[in-house]
Image (cartoon, rainbow, N blue to C red):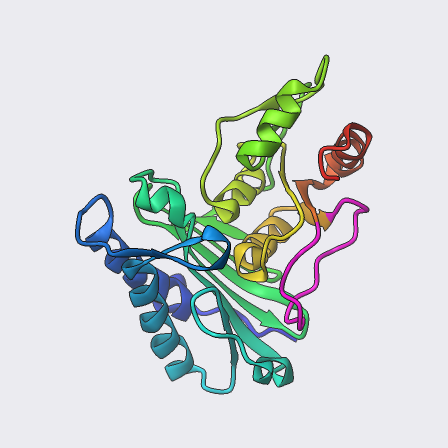
Amino acid sequence: MASDPPSLKDNLIVSAAVKAGEIGMSYFQKDTNNIWYKSGNSPVSQADKEIDEFLRQRLLGNRPDHGWLSEETEDTPKRLDNNRLFIVDPIDGTRGFIAGKKEWCISIAVVENDRPIEGVLHCPALGKTIHAFKGQGVTVDGSHSGSPKIQRQRPLVTGSKKLIEVIRDIPGTPMDTTDFIPSLAYRLSLVATGELDAAFARQGASEWDIAAADIILEEAGCVLSDKNGTQIRYNRKNVASPALVASSADRQKEILGLANSSGILQ
């Protein structure tokens, strides 16, 4: 069973994320950030690597009994033996970060067995920090946030660039869309804060993209699931996720119906 959370002032993952954000901002919109590309033409920057190393030392230095899974650290099967682990994305939304867009964040989750029990998304360029602890609700910039109140008749949704195009091209589409938001984790969190009705992701997002957002959604009375409504599990050998749907709990059936009937997640 999860223990009571410490105050945010002394909270390990929040304070680590804030410090990591300072590292990120030292490179943001500057020419000093070296960039190279991994397999699949995915960019990684000097800032990603520096933040990853800082977080690994800070978090595991304080909780050496935890496992570790990060986008920028080579994965090993050892983490599968840990009941608790950190799941980290040093910069979620690296392409946007490199392009000078503000919608990127440091994403840290604590997973117990196969579900997150705590998560933080720190978005330093936006001046925004979203934190959740299991059973304790969600705080935005240190203030408790209530469950989102959705008033719109047509759901306002977002996704990848391609998904947004697909949704907009559906004849008589019953959904309104936002402009593209670079960070998947931040996109998902906007459902938790009530700024969006739903967010979609095609198959292939990794655990580090979604774990922190998942507990934030859950604590806000929202749901992150596959297209069949099944909850996502973590610390698996294969870290790639199925197609994803995030929505408020009271609109989940409607949103899943729209996603499946339109075929946007095929």
Is residue 127 visible from the viewing direction of this image? Answer: no
Give the residue at the far top of this rendering.
172
156 vs 251, nearest the viewer: 156
Give the total number of marks visible in the rendering.
0
Q: Is residue 239 magenta?
A: yes
4 vs 184, nearest the viewer: 184
Q: Whole-percent x and y of residue 56?
A: 39, 75
Q: Whole-percent x and y of residue 115?
A: 66, 66
> Residue at the spot x=39%, y=45% of the render?
95
Which image quadrant for residue 113?
A: bottom right
> Residue at the spot x=45%, y=40% of the render?
182
Q: Image quadrant for the C terminus?
A: top right
Q: Whole-percent x and y of residue 103?
A: 39, 41
51 vs 109, nearest the viewer: 51
Q: Is residue 151 left or right of residue 226?
A: left
Q: Is residue 74 left or right of residue 254?
A: left
Q: Is residue 129 magenta?
A: no
When the figure is inspected, residue 91 is found, relative to residue 196, above or below; the finding is below
When the figure is inspected, residue 88 is found, relative to residue 152, above or below; the finding is below
> Residue at the spot x=70%, y=47% of the render?
243
Secondary structure mostly taken by the magenta-highlighted segment of the chain: loop
Q: Whole-percent x and y of residue 265?
A: 72, 39
Residue range in magenta is 226-242
Is residue 183 visible from the viewing direction of this image? Answer: yes
> Residue at the spot x=61%, y=33% of the render?
163
When the figure is inspected, residue 97 is found, relative to residue 36, above or below; the finding is above
